[in-house]
Image (cartoon, rainbow, N blue to C red):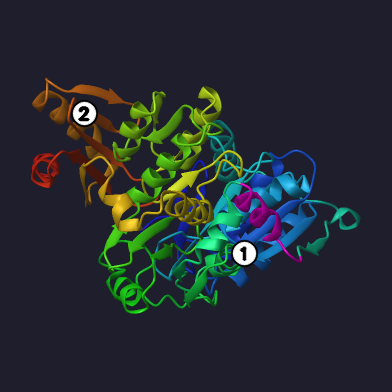
Amino acid sequence: MSELIISVSGLRGIVGETLTPEVASRFVAAFASKLPAGPIIVGRDGRSSGPMLSRAITAALTACGRDCVDADVAATPTIGVLVRELGAAGAVQISASHNPPPYNGIKLFGPTGRVLDAITGGAIRDAYFDSQADWAAFDQIGSISVAHDPHEPHLHKVLATVDTAAIVTAKHRVLLDSNHGAGGLLGKRLLQALGCDVVLVGETPDGQFAHVPEPTADNLSGIAEWVRQENCAVGFCQDPDADRLALVDGDGRYIGEEYTLALCVQRAMADPATRGPIVINGATSGMSESLAQTAGVTSFRSAVGEANVADMMIAEKATYGGEGNGGPIDPRVGYVRDSFVGMAQVLDLMTASGKSLAELADALPKFHIVKATAKVTADFLPALIEALTQQHPDAEASSGDGLRLAWPDKWLLVRGSNTEPIVRLIAEAQTEAEAQALCDGAAALI
């Protein structure tokens, strides 16, 4: 990453190079200048650079006359719940999600407890570039208080979405891999409240990742074997800020992130209280779409990005949604991707159905998704989109979020990343070979 990457929901960079205390201070000062009155919550994942950035950020916010609530280590969805619980004006979550240890970042929340929408985020980004800040006089400097248990409100909201008593009776043995990120603090409490026999891996939130933090099959091969050896019914694997969840079955098979959302959607469609329209993004597997169709409800596809999914969920009054990177969104808990929602609701589905995770996953509609990346400059993307559109005149083409080409039985998405200087190629079809061919065909034009 040669430059700081700034999106409408925050920024991400290499600590000491593109992301410095000065950059962080300027960014949150611009953020504070656009917020209504009220305190601002500051949280972080377990990265070793988090305490330093937290001190710089709280100093800048108090210098703008803002009172701060220090949530210390907390998952990203927990921060969203806490904003609403405390009636805060917004929040700053310090996290670089799945990026390696040299990285860190800032994610911004508005007063509704969700990541910023594009319009608000764009205004803050512009304010940062314009060096806008409302620095306070010496007698108007803000104060700092501590959130002594930031996790409890989130815990209760998640438990309220499932049949806790039934799950407790089932006595599931599970493995939780938080990989030394923020997820272990609430994850342990949640699974114990659900009566699980928990094998904890990477519980300490010190950022000393035991494996590459993105929860992919290659990165979780050791964890998958651990799940099998420990005779667990399921392995839950979180990313560092715990808004994403990958699954491993009892045989040590990596089920993955796409299945997390699909299984949660399946459960939602079986409950009259949550059976209703769903929203997924343009890069998410059609499994959830198919499940919604079977349930007789409408599914919508938004642009990629949590904020875009949340925007469409609110607009369409969706009862469920999420992204295929392991991020279910249950509006009853909050409009934030949530690994804890995923864990509780997958256990609820296993308990209610009496089926293993493997049986549930194998019974889902069959699709094969392939994801690839290519390093190209942003300037080249329009030419690539034009070439692909001409190459596939038989496809239904939609733009606005890169290019999505859709056929009755397959689709291809080509888009620039919001967090890395790359182009993402994502395809889904009824066979892996066909999906791979779609990605390969697009890559050949680069």
- Name the outermost residue toward the right: 139
Residue annotated with mark 2 = 405
x and y percentages locating residue 438 in the rendered image: 12, 39
Relative to 292, does residue 93 appear above or below in the rendering?
below
> Disc number at residue 193?
1
Task: From the viewer's perspective, tell me whether residue 358 is left or right of residue 110.
Answer: left
Q: Amino acid at mark 2?
A: Leu
Task: From the viewer's perspective, tell me whether residue 74 is left or right of residue 17.
Answer: right
Extent of the magenta region: 148-160
Task: From the viewer's perspective, tell me whether residue 159 is left or right of residue 375.
Answer: right
The CA span between labels 1 and 2 is 45 Å
Task: From the viewer's perspective, tell me whether residue 142 is left or right of residue 218.
Answer: right
**Residue 92 visible in the picture:** no
**Residue 350 visible in the picture:** yes
Considering the whole magenta stretch, tell me its main secondary structure.
Answer: helix
Q: Specify the quadrant of the image occupied by residue 22.
A: bottom right
Q: Residue at x 52, y 44 (%)?
A: 9
- Asked if disc 1 and disc 2 are in contact, CB closer than 8 Å, the reply is no
x and y percentages locating residue 324 in the rendered image: 36, 45
Q: Amino acid at mark 1?
A: Ala
x and y percentages locating residue 195 in the rendered image: 57, 66
Relative to 361, does residue 365 appear above or below in the rendering?
above
Label 2 residue SS: strand
Say which of marks 1 and 2 sits in front.
1
Q: Mark 1 or mark 2: which comes first in sequence?
A: 1
